[in-house]
Amino acid sequence: MFSGVEYKLAAPVTDYVNVVHQRLTQAGSDDVTFSCNCVLNYLYSELKGEQTAHMFGPMTFGEIAYQLLNQTLVYVVVEDA
């Protein structure tokens, strides 16, 4: 938790597996250079044996900037300025 930040609970997702699969195909582009997916997404989204569209990279714990945020997926796209 960070001081000075107002936190809110997220709305529940009723069909987590389908929502994750849908978002994977919508997010980013074929130009994704690197991605990191939370191992909980792998488990809860039934990704065993599945392709994650153009997202490839390690499965790890959902940490961004030294803050643990479970069920995250981050990716990098390199573009010309």
Image (cartoon, rainbow, N blue to C red):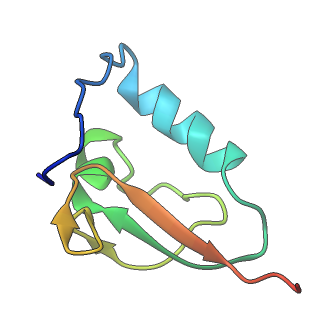
Residue appearing at x 42%, y 58% in the figure: 73
* Position of residue 61 measured from the top left corner of the image (x, y, whole percent): 20, 66
Q: Is residue 67 left or right of residue 42?
A: left
The residue at the far right in this view is: 80
Q: Is residue 49 above or below residue 18?
A: below
Q: Is residue 8 above or below residue 79?
A: above
Marks counted in the figure total: 0
| Rendered image quadrant of residue 12 | top left
| Rendered image quadrant of residue 6 | top left
Q: Is residue 22 above or below residue 33?
A: above
Q: Nearer the viewer, residue 51 or 72?
A: 72
* Position of residue 60 measured from the top left corner of the image (x, y, whole percent): 25, 72
Residue appearing at x 36%, y 19% in the figure: 13
Q: Is residue 34 left or right of residue 40?
A: right
| Rendered image quadrant of residue 31 | bottom right
Q: Is residue 49 above or below residue 43?
A: below
Q: Nearer the viewer, residue 78 or 60?
A: 78
Q: Is residue 60 left or right of residue 45?
A: left
Residue appearing at x 22%, y 33% in the figure: 7
Residue appearing at x 38%, y 64% in the figure: 37
